[in-house]
């Protein structure tokens, strides 16, 4: 069966084995020798675990040196069984689950066969006991049962009895002797009591073979590597289930790590921290309307002088300022939603489709909360945006009003002489939009509102015409700017202040939030990146630690015949199970997570849209966990992880 020809192995220039040759057939064989004589080295060579040596080693005519890693895993699942001094069982699994490990690579999980073997070895009663609660002798019988499940041609046992008491050692040897009847059993031992004179003895001394039986080895038919040596998805899931049950704590830690990392990445991706003051702005806009983002640019206004508006200290001042050219400067600015001229009209009469309507004057400056239909006037034609209240009096819908022509006549104030003089002006214009003209304000601590029903907003062309009729010479008009965002509002305000212009607006309400937000965005920009990096590093660390803690477990799978592809399929199945559980956990705990993020960042991160992103992020983090575990699998060296021999 085995043919060893002139095999030598050196470590650091010292011979662990020196020109060994022998042949080995069926039956029980002992490899004996003092500590350091090369016994374990010889076992590693004949089992294919050490393929870097001088000379030749054949099993059934096949060069052991040339076995590929896939062939080796096939051999370990079907041809070679291993029994170790310290058993190398999966301690948290039951006896039956341990025994079934090699069978996951075969499509028939033959439990009947396992039961027969357990009965033969007199451990059937222990089938559902966890291995960690068994005695040494019982554990060794479980290990033998697991290897017998492979129905192997060869059993290699490295010091199988040295952890057992004399009686149990004898029982174990009896079992090995019995199974050597129809296969090759190779036992490395120090214990001379175990050796009987009917067995074959290979005696090593300082790496040299000083005694060996003259065996006539009958040629055995060559072995085939079965390409179907695979782990089915069904079996990968079954093994995952068994691992989750047996190591529930580990599963929960991994799942929680994925969930926490997913949620932390979500805060980074969603910009929750950076955009946390958005919630504050939304509240303000709910209260004060869209007009909160307005900046009025006017040629003159009354200012309450003195600090705190103390009128006695300094009288009210009529401030005049040059706003010429500002309209043209801002009309196309990217930070602006729209501009509108703040022209007040008196005694308004409007004729629509031949019917005349009178609009009550409010005496207020025109106001616009938001457009409810159409658009703001543009271009060089006569266009107008009318108040919603006016459309109601027409008895038509806002949409129906769009495109209608109105004949508008009114009186306008001409201030050119320094005193107000009312002048007539009229125009025909097309309605292009309808505006909600509500004004929201705070009065004695309470929110109040009113509508400015005579807020008509004309295009520049129409206004120029009317101002000409009213003989107004001054060519600057008061106008308002609707900023896109509160931040845009403050940036335009700062710009105007720098140019010596005092704009009007409710800046004090938003300014602090904008400035604070700018500061926190700069800080939290790097903070959120750090949080994102931290969460991924945390996952890598947890999976590296668990991966390296599982090295022995991976090595046990490897000597049971699992190759890297099988172990990575198991890795994938475990990570998918964790991803699904973590996603479910995130869904269930989302109200709690939202309470936490509202407290921290004044925003709920897990709305229905973000939940899906959260699941995707958990899956992405799981990919990192998969790769980390794959590295641990790759770095698992069976012989180091399982520590053969006494050392
Ligand atoms: N990986 C290694 N690196 C360096 N030296 C090694 C290595 N493995 C074995 N050796 C050396 O090779 C020699 C033979 O070691 P081996 O483990 O085969 O002996 P052994 O007979 O099994 O000893 P023991 O009964 O104590 O396990 C020893 O001198 C040992 O120190």
Image (spheres, rainbow, N blue to C red):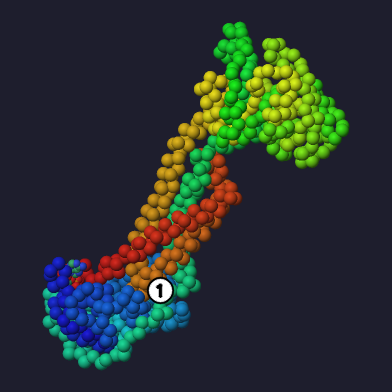
Identify the residue shown where x is 31% and y is 71%: 87
Q: Residue 236 location, x and y as percent? A: 46, 70
Q: Quadrant of the N terminus?
A: bottom left
Q: Residue 238 location, x and y as percent? A: 48, 70
Between 277 and 604, the one nearer to me in the picture = 277
Residue 407 visible here: yes
Q: Residue 84 location, x and y as percent? A: 29, 73
Identify the residue shown where x is 47% and y is 47%: 264
Q: Ligand 1 is in which quadrant of the figure? A: bottom left
Identify the residue shown where x is 48% and y is 62%: 576
Label 1: how many Cα within 10 Å (few below 14, some 14–19, many 20+): many
Within 8 Å: ligand 1 and the Cβ of disc 1? no
Q: Which residue is mark 1?
A: 101
| Residue 187 in the figure: left or right of residue 112 | left
Identify the residue shown where x is 42% and y is 51%: 536
Quadrant housing residue 211: bottom left
Q: Residue 557 location, x and y as percent? A: 37, 71
Identify the secondary structure beneath mark 1. Answer: helix
Quadrant housing residue 82: bottom left
Residue 86's place in the image compared with 296, above or below, is below
Residue extending farthest to the right is: 355
Between 372 and 88, the one nearer to me in the picture = 372
Q: Quadrant of the C terminus?
A: bottom left
């Amino acid at each position: 069966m085995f043919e060893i020809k002139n095999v030598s192995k050196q470590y650091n220039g010292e011979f662990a084995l020196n020109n060994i040759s022998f042949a080995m057939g069926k039956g029980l064989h002992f490899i004996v020798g003092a500590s350091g004589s090369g016994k374990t080295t010889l076992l590693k060579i004949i089992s294919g675990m050490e393929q870097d040596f001088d000379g030749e080693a054949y099993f059934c005519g096949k060069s052991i040196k040339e076995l590929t890693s896939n062939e080796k895993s096939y051999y370990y699942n079907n041809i070679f069984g291993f029994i170790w001094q310290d058993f190398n069982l999966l301690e948290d699994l039951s006896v039956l689950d341990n025994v079934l490990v090699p069978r996951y690579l075969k499509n028939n999980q033959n439990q009947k066969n396992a039961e027969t073997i357990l009965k033969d070895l007199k451990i059937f009663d222990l089938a559902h006991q966890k291995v960690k609660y068994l005695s040494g002798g019982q554990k060794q019988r479980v290990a033998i049962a697991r290897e017998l499940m492979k129905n192997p041609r060869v059993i290699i046992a490295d010091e199988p009895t040295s952890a057992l008491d004399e009686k149990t050692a004898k029982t174990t040897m009896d079992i090995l002797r019995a199974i050597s009847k129809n296969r090759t059993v190779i036992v490395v031992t120090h214990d001379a009591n175990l050796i009987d004179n009917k067995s074959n003895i290979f005696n090593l001394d300082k790496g040299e073979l000083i005694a060996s039986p003259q065996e006539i080895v009958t040629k055995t038919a060559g072995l085939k590597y079965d390409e179907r040596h695979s782990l089915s998805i069904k079996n990968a899931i079954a093994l995952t289930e068994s691992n989750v049950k047996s190591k529930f704590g580990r599963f929960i830690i991994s799942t929680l790590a994925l969930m926490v990392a997913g949620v932390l990445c979500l805060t980074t991706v969603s910009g929750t921290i950076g955009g946390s003051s958005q919630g504050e702005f939304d509240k303000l806009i709910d209260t004060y309307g869209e007009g909160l983002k307005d900046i009025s640019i006017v040629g003159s206004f009354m200012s309450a002088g003195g600090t705190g508006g103390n009128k006695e200290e300094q009288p009210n001042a009529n401030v005049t300022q040059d706003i010429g050219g500002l309209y043209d400067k801002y009309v196309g600015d990217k930070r602006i939603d729209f501009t509108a001229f703040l022209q007040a009209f008196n005694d308004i009469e409007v004729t629509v489709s031949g019917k005349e309507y009178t609009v009550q004057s409010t005496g207020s400056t025109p106001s616009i909360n938001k457009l409810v239909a159409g658009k703001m006037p543009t271009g060089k034609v006569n266009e107008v945006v009318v108040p919603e209240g006016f459309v109601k009096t027409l008895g038509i819908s806002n949409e129906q009003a769009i495109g209608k022509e109105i004949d508008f006549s009114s009186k306008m104030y001409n201030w050119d002489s320094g005193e107000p003089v009312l002048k007539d002006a009229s125009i025909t214009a097309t309605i292009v939009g309808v505006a909600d003209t509500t004004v929201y304000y705070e009065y004695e601590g309470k929110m109040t509102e009113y509508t400015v029903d005579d807020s008509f907003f004309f295009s520049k062309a129409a206004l120029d015409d009317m101002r000409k009729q009213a003989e107004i010479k001054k060519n600057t008009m008061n106008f308002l700017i609707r900023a896109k965002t509160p931040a845009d509002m403050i940036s335009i305000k700062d710009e105007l202040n720098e140019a010596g212009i005092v704009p009007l607006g409710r800046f004090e309400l938003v300014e602090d939030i904008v400035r604070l937000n700018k500061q926190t965005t700069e800080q939290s920009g790097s903070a959120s990146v750090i949080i994102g990096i931290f969460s991924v590093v945390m996952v890598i660390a947890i999976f590296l630690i668990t991966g390296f803690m599982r090295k022995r477990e991976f090595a046990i799978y490897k000597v049971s015949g699992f190759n890297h592809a099988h172990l990575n399929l198991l890795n994938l199945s475990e990570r998918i199970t964790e991803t699904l559980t973590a996603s479910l956990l995130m869904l269930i705990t989302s109200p709690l997570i939202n309470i936490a993020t509202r407290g921290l960042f004044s925003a709920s991160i897990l709305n229905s849209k973000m939940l899906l992103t959260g699941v995707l992020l958990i899956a992405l983090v799981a990919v990192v966990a998969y790769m980390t575990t794959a590295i641990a699998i790759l770095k698992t060296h069976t012989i180091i992880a399982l520590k053969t021999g006494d050392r």
